[in-house]
Image (cartoon, coloured by chain):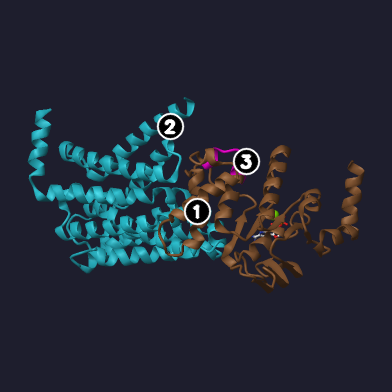
Chain colours: A brown, B cyan
């Protein structure tokens, strides 16, 4: 059984639908890239998968040992207010909150895992720094470490490299790929079709034309060919 | 100098003064705890609105002639907190507008009742007390002292138990919700705690000044400290110190206790801003 199954989804806000009839499945270890125009409903889909938004029609189900709340999440932009006092460690630790239930404090094992995740993200030396004083790339790493605390199985990333400079962007992609190699299923929204074609195993295109399939299949479609020829022209 | 001390010693031989100090410090401790959340979560307008609601409820309670106002004031204020939170979330009337309507309404209604059914010969004195607190803390009844102490301890305990959840929900509500934290429940708990704190503080500094007691220590601490925990600890300590200082000064200088405490809080804010500026540059 697939980790995530979306069947006949219609997405939208307040009765106005944006995307209709969307069906796809994600299996353990997949790297799915969701591409599409600005405003085509990528973030909306993400929120629906996370249960923040109810689908207008259709269903989102998790399976293969994945519970709905075990999905880690990197929001498109976290609008943290300018003055919010929070250290990186506090932010990362808060990733465990969902699995805490009514337990008021974090366990020693959770603290250890938080340290490990910060190490993985290369932000151990920033642990006591103030979150909002970090650079964009450092903040993304902290939020990724937080997402890793919330899951061992599946990460949803909404434009994780938006606003990062090229160097930091490629570092971020490498980091995400390495997490995927460790067995974490990745669902990433991206503007960057180049990156999607480079890293993903599956592509979901939403917009006027909906496509779901493997990367190889995508490159053979008209859309995919368009992107490939564009890439060819650029080089 | 010895004069001041002998005067203080004179005051503090009375139980009622000592109790007042204890209650004041406990209320100060409680009110500072949720300051950061209140400031950062757009709840500050709710806090302000609620204090006006509490004023209205106080007026009604006065008319009923109950010995203890809190029996009425507490449920009404908590109820309004829940209501405001619910409306702020998902209605056509925007949250702020709903708060404004309720708070101004409660003020007018409260003043109307106090004038129509005066409980004493001095209506403006009563109004002033409700708005700005008792002139001296020594007018607190023993019953109020006990209730305040118990509720304060409950509030502190709840805050400690829910500390990590309050942080998660304040920092990033969507993430918390997406990963299975019941954000709605914790928002409700936060709102109820705020309502309780406001009612507690009303007896002490009055409904207009209670917001200051909640917000100033947090704002001061945020000038200097950068993590949630250090800000929380600092604002709690600061609030306790400022309040104790304010009470002592008001006893010696015979000034109104609520306003004195707020003045000390503002002074502390100035000092912390300065420290923050120096630290930021250094
Ligand atoms: N909270 C909201 N309420 C109503 N409409 C929204 C809301 N958020 C987004 N939309 C609309 O839904 C559409 C899709 O938005 P979104 O999913 O954010 O697009 P993408 O992430 O693909 O750029 C847009 O037209 C946007 O205006
Ligand atoms: Mg988006």
Number of the label disc, if any, that sits on residue B276? 2
Taking B54 as reference, is B209 above or below it?
A: above
Indicate left or right for A40 with B46 as reference. Answer: right
Magenta run includes residue A71: no
Nearer the viewer's eye, disc 2 or disc 3?
Answer: 3
Which residue is painted at 28% across and 61% down in the image? B58
Q: Is residue B39 visible?
A: yes
Q: Distance between the residues labelled 3 and 1?
A: 19 Å
10 Å crowding of disc 3: few (<14), some (14-19), many (20+): some
Tag 3–tag 1 contact (CB < 8 Å) = no
The image quadrant in which ligand 1 is located: bottom right
Taking A19 as reference, is B122 above or below it?
A: above
Nearer the viewer's eye, disc 3 or disc 1?
Answer: 1
Which residue is painted at 17% across and 54% down in the image? B140
Q: Is residue B88 visible?
A: no
Res B69 quadrant in image = bottom left
Q: How far apart are marks 2 and 3 (CA)?
A: 24 Å
Residues rendered magenta in the picture:
A131-140
Which badge, 3 or 1, is on the more N-terminal residue?
1
- The residue where tag 1 is placed is A94
Tag 2–tag 1 contact (CB < 8 Å) = no
- The residue where tag 3 is placed is A136
Depth order, front residue of A76/B72: A76
Depth order, front residue of B64/B257: B257
Secondary structure, mark 3, is: helix
Res B198 quadrant in image = bottom left
Depth order, front residue of A125/B240: A125
Magenta run includes residue A138: yes
Q: Mark 2 lies on which chain?
A: B
Q: Do labels 3 and 1 share a chain?
A: yes
């Amino acid at each position: 059984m697939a980790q995530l199954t979306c069947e006949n989804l219609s997405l939208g806000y307040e009765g106005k639908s944006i995307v209709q009839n969307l069906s796809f499945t994600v299996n353990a270890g997949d790297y799915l890239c969701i591409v599409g125009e600005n405003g085509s409903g990528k973030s909306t889909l993400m929120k629906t998968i996370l249960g923040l938004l109810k689908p207008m029609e259709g269903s989102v189900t998790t399976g293969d040992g994945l519970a709905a709340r075990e999905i880690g999440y990197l929001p498109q932009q976290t609008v943290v207010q300018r003055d919010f006092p929070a250290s990186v460690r506090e932010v990362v630790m808060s990733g465990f909150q969902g699995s805490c239930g009514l337990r008021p404090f974090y366990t020693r094992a959770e603290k250890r895992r938080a340290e490990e995740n910060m190490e993985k993200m290369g932000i151990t030396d920033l642990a006591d720094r103030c979150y909002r004083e970090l650079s964009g790339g450092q903040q993304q790493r902290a939020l990724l470490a937080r997402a890793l605390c919330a899951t061992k199985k599946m990460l949803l990333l909404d434009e994780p490299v938006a606003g990062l400079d090229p160097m930091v962007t490629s570092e971020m992609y490498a980091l995400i790929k390495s997490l995927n190699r460790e067995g974490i299923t990745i669902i990433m929204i991206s503007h960057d079709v180049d990156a999607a074609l480079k890293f993903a195993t599956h592509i979901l295109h939403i917009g006027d034309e909906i496509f779901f399939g493997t990367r190889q299949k995508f490159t053979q479609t008209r859309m995919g060919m368009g992107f490939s020829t564009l890439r060819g022209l650029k080089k | 100098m010895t004069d001041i001390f002998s005067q203080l010693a004179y005051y503090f031989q009375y139980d009622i003064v000592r109790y007042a100090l204890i209650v004041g410090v406990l209320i100060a401790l409680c009110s500072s705890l949720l300051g950061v959340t209140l400031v950062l979560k757009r709840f500050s307008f709710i806090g302000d609105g609620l204090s006006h609601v509490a004023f209205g409820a106080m007026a009604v309670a006065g008319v009923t002639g109950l010995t203890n106002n809190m029996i009425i004031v507490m449920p009404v204020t908590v109820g309004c907190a829940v209501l405001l939170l619910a409306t702020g979330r998902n209605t056509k009337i925007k949250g702020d507008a709903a708060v404004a309507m309720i708070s101004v309404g409660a003020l007018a209604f409260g003043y109307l009742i106090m004038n129509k059914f005066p409980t004493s010969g001095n209506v403006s004195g009563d109004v002033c007390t409700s708005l700005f607190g008792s002139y001296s803390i020594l007018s607190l009844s023993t019953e109020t002292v006990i209730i305040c102490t118990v509720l304060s301890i409950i509030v502190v305990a709840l805050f400690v138990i829910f500390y990590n959840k309050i942080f998660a929900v304040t920092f990033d509500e969507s993430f918390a919700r997406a990963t299975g934290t019941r954000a709605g429940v914790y928002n409700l708990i936060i709102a109820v705690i705020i309502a309780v704190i406001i009612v507690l503080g009303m007896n002490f500094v009055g409904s207009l000044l209670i917001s200051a007691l909640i917000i100033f220590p947090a704002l001061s601490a945020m000038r200097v400290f950068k993590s949630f925990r250090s800000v929380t600890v600092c604002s709690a300590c600061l609030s306790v110190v400022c309040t104790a200082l304010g009470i002592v000064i008001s006893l010696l200088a015979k000034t109104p206790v609520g306003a004195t405490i707020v003045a000390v809080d503002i002074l502390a804010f100035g000092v912390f801003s300065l420290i923050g500026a120096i630290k930021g540059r250094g």
